[in-house]
Amino acid sequence: MKGLFQGKGWAVLCLLPFALFFIVFQIAPLLWVAVHSVQVDDGWSLSNFTRAFGSKFYRQAMQFSLEISVWSSLLGLLIAVVGSISLSKVDSRLRNFVNAFANMTSNFAGVPLAFAFIILLGFNGAITLVLKQSGLVDGFNLYSKGGLILVYTYFQIPLGVLLLYPALDALREDWRESAALLGASTWRYWWHIGLPVLTPALLGTFVILLANALGAYATVYALTTGNFNVLPIRIAAMVAGDISLDPNMASALAIILVGMMTLVTVVHQWMLRRSYHVAR
Amino acid sequence: MPAERTAHALYHRTVVWVLFLILLLPLAGTLLYSLATSWSATILPSGLTLKWYLALWSETRFLQAFGRSLFVCVGALVLATVLILPLLFVINYHFPRLDALMNVLILLPFAVPPVVSAVGLLQLYGSGPLAMVGTPWILMGCYFTVALPFMYRAISNNLQAIQLRDLMDAAHLLGASTLQAALLVVLPNLRKGLLVALLLSFSFLFGEFVFANLLVGTQYETLQVYLNNMRNSTGHINSALVISYFFFVLVLTWLATFLNKGKH
């Protein structure tokens, strides 16, 4: 019997609602941004981009975005690597506990995270005051580039651990034992065997962390009330601010931001293909 | 080399504990601050109290924001389920080739930061036939896209694990229509995996700030926007808010892990 629901027509109909919502909330806004980035009041033009790259202010936003993202991703990755390696070596109770905790803290980002850091490391934060009293520092500015790198690094660590830890399975214990038998020190083992094997996973994690930091808005907005010059803040200020609304310019900066991420991803793919150790 | 073994073990344990402490420190500090009567210029607070939590949980604006966040997140997840389940069923059963396309499409919400989407959304739906800016409905739509990559992958993995085609064939053989088989045979088999995916999605949607602040702001104040708007009030209440929020998310993720374990 061929019922009504047997035909493929119904199957296609099932795809429609999804397609509709996906277009309205994902594709259409992206297309709007792409089209308007190359528009000015009197027609098509690339002048939004020339203005963006010509202006010191916007160039600074790009530079700060990149600096904060690259440093926080590197530091986060470093801590995640060292942590993950040790995680794979401790007993399973401690490992499961810390893994679960990292899982939970990966949700601790954005506004709540910014508030926690303000309370601890703001101008009158508990840790800042202790450090000041002990004479170690004369004051720590959380609202500076260094402060932002610190906060970003914090939210990169759990993500890095979650992404890297499973990849460590690729390292087999007998490789280490063979290397040790042949007289290799721990350092030589890591330099010649461990790191090269892990390279694809490290690169992949780095790219995700970088994209995560480049697009981050909530943390820096909550921390500096939108006064720190990074790309997401600039973009948002030009569409939702009280002054100087310029959606076309915002679109151009948005495309630059997406372009940076795409560039990173393309470089990553290229390096992966060149990588000797990648499984074929 | 037992001595060297112990040294190695000690090193690894130390590193793991340091990692744990790094992750714990901001949370522990906030927790302590939320319980402190006052805390300034000393290593530890001068006294402990629950009054900040009482003040917070009797604040109408907070309770309203909490309720709004719940409403938006639950609405978004219902929408996501209603849209993604039939899609995945149809793809797996009728058009397996579409899966490759979908795997590219679901990267978009990852690759395009919310702040970029928000630019287009504000202009497209600020006025005109689809004027939704400032309402919870636009948030539900956006949160559907945020949850999409995760939900799609989670449900897809589940569908592959249950051998959809065999199940459907068996149901057909016993006289069920495709719709009956999908609703009465396949859906119950997906229930647990779906629930885990929903709980985890909820826990990250609940913390969403960018869309909420840019598209809706104070016109429909959700929890994260409320927290941001309270920046000038006392830090103790804010800490109580952060801890309450985190505790809520913690219970959800714990529940998801627990359910996930029971599955195997």
Image (cartoon, rainbow, N blue to C red):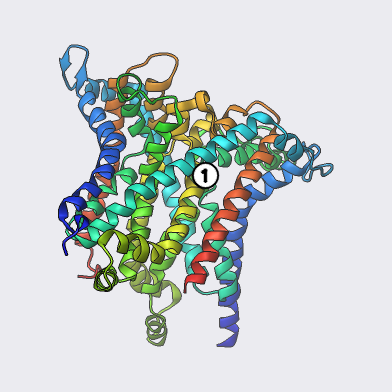
Which quarter of the image is occupied by the N terminus of chain A? bottom left
Name the quadrant of the C terminus of chain A. Answer: bottom left
Residue at the (22%, 22%) spot, across then down? A50
Q: Which quadrant would residue A245 be assigned to in this image? A: top left
Which chain does the residue under circle 1 lie in? Answer: A
The one of A148 and B192 positioned closer to us in this rendering? B192
Q: Is residue A54 left or right of residue A205?
A: left
Could you tell me which secondary element the residue under label 1 belongs to? loop
Residue B242 is drawn in which quadrant? top right
Residue nearest the viewer, comparing B30 with B209: B209
Please name the amino acid that badge 1 sits on.
Answer: Ala
Q: Position of residue B139 (x, y in %)?
A: 42, 34
Q: Position of residue A193 (x, y in %)?
A: 34, 73
Residue bearing the label numbered 1:
A109
Task: Indicate the position of residue A130 as horizontal and vertical percent values.
Answer: 73, 42
Give the residue drawn at x 34%, y 58%: B153
Residue depicted at x 47% and y 68%: A85
Q: Is residue A34 visible?
A: yes
Residue projecting furthest to the top: A42
A221 versus A70 height, above or below:
above
